[in-house]
Amino acid sequence: MPSLRYRHIVWDWNGTLLDDLDYSIAVMNGLLAKRSLPLLDRTRYHELFDFPVRDYYYRLGFDPARDSFESLSVEFISAYDAHRWDCRLHRVTAEILAAVTQGGATQSILSAYRHETLHEIVGHFGLTPHFIRLTGLDNIFAHSKAELGRAWLKELSLPAGDVLLVGDTLHDLDVANHMGVDCVLVAAGHHPAARLRARHDRVVENLPALRDLLAL
């Protein structure tokens, strides 16, 4: 197999490797229904979801005087984690990770998911051996992961041009720009293709298309 152009690939987790879009919508609809707020479908979710997550919550109509962001985060994550094992990986996830390794590159995950939970779910799918590092946040509030990305790039001791970040949201693009590395966005997760392409020219529809782009 020919070697990859990149020596290291940084993956996002939720929405990029893990197919949790519809599950995330269902969990949030549980919170909205309890408060008689308008429910989400994919179209409305794709219009509203963004980082920082705090702003997204209040765009959904939650009343900050009644529900603090912190309490909503605890409620959402508790409901999400209750059945997180029901989620599945995106198609060809295992195959593309194996192909990257065979192509001579190392891999890591940089996620806004809580660090300990990230380790648990990646291990649940048997994917841990593919990665030299799993990095998540130290809390449940899904703040920016940009500084974690910068610190990881410094620790990697690789030129920025040898590193590719793959994600599914514009936040992933912002993180890649903050790190100074290349980025490919996969339009099968939490931001739709049109929204991604409005800001970036390297967007693929799904992981099989990414596999083709990287010539794996």
Image (spheres, rainbow, N blue to C red):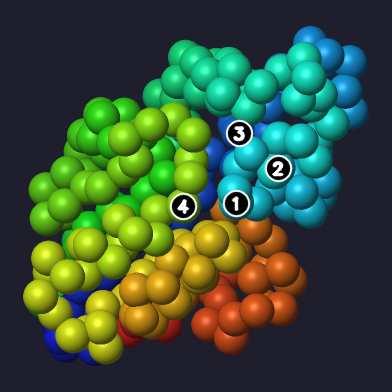
Given residues 125 and 150, the one toward you in this image is 150
- The numbered mark, 2 or 3, whose residue comes first in the sequence reads 3
* Location of mark 3 (residue): 24
* Location of mark 4 (residue): 144
Distance from the alpha carbon under mark 3 to that under mark 1: 15 Å
* Location of mark 2 (residue): 56
* Location of mark 1 (residue): 51
Label 3 amino acid? Ser
- The numbered mark, 3 or 1, whose residue comes first in the sequence reads 3
- Specify few, some or many for label 3: CA neighbours under 10 Å numbering under 14, 14-19, or 20 or more: many
Label 1 amino acid? Phe
What x and y, as percent, mark residue 38? 89, 28
**Is the Cβ of the residue at disc 4 closer than 8 Å to that at disc 1?**
yes
**Is the Cβ of the residue at disc 3 closer than 8 Å to that at disc 4?**
no
Residue, x 88% and y 23% (percent of image)? 37
Foreground tag (3 vs 1): 1
- The numbered mark, 4 or 1, whose residue comes first in the sequence reads 1
Residue 108, quarter of picture: bottom left
